[in-house]
Amino acid sequence: MSELVHPLKMGSFTGVGVGPGPAGYLPLAAFEALKQADLIYVPRARGAELSVALQCLAGIDVPAHKLVEIEFNMDPDRSVLSEHYKNLAESIAARLHAGQHVAYLTIGDSMTYSTYGYILAALIESVQGLVYKTYPGITSYAAAASALDWPLGEGKERTLILPCPEDKETLRTEIETHDIIVLMKIGDRLTWVLELLREMNIAHQCVFAKRIGLSGEILARGVQTLSATDTMGYLATMLIRKTPRERR
């Protein structure tokens, strides 16, 4: 009598937000999940020598054989990105069907302007009965606010989280209609952003953070004299306050 062959049990997928930089920002529950993972996908931006997500695990003992580094395509063409996410999801799905438990690292929070959301959506669509769990992480703006003693909202202040617009007047309108702006994805628009804040005479009550907890960290209380040339680039966040903080 031949032996019965049991199909492999489907593996599970875990998304882990590792925070904006310091290894100590990784949630304990997420750390335990990483220890249980068979494989850990580590995204690295194209052209970057090191994965920022991996740097966020500095000091944590993660076996090298578990790590799968993937170069991430940040192409603005949505069709190119869609194909990239599809191919990555297929790779992860093959691991899951083989019964492996797969974790995916993402900097900041898993569901805040994160590539993880696209990967999860592609997996849910392609893997029937997908078993998954998402662990939140500390956002760059929460870390910046704490590092610079800058409340993100008090009383009934309205706070807007905003990817930087393409033009000065759009940003001016957003500032005028909200109390606080969390400005993300600034990139090479930093020059005119700083010009606008100085024109509106609010630069002194705004703050800027870049590469929090990593080499080359910049923390600026007030951006009156901040140099765009020296601070422009990836992993930068601006916190904008329209009016002075009310004394209580």
Image (cartoon, grey):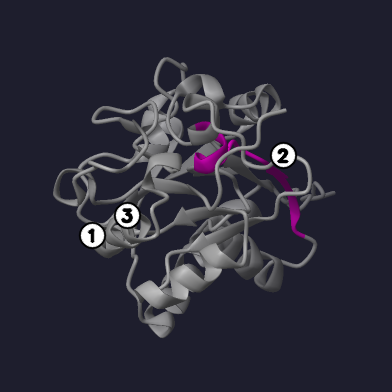
- What's the residue type where badge 1 is placed? Thr
- Mark in the foreground, 1 or 3: 3
Asked if residue 242 lies left or right of residue 203, the reply is right
**Number of on-image labels:** 3
Residue 247's place in the image compared with 108, above or below, is above
- In the rendered structure, are the residues bearing label 3 and label 2 in contact, judged by CB atoms less than 8 Å apart? no
Q: Residue beneath label 1, please?
A: 191
Residue 91's place in the image compared with 87, above or below, is above
Alpha-carbon span between mark 2 and mark 1: 29 Å
When asked about the image quadrant of residue 79, the answer is bottom left
Residue 198 is labelled as: 3
Asked if residue 11 lies left or right of residue 213, the reply is right
Q: Is tag 3's residue or tag 2's residue first in the polypeptide sequence?
A: 2
When asked about the image quadrant of residue 168, the answer is bottom left
Which segment is the magenta one? 130-143
Residue 154 is labelled as: 2
Q: Secondary structure at mark 1?
A: helix
Q: Residues within 10 Å of mark 3 (few under 14, many from 20)?
A: some
Report the front residue among 64 and 115: 115
Asked if residue 229 lies left or right of residue 52, the reply is left
- What's the residue type where badge 3 is placed? Arg
Q: Secondary structure at mark 2?
A: loop
When asked about the image quadrant of residue 33, the answer is top right
Q: Is residue 138 magenta?
A: yes
**Residue 224, can we see it?**
yes
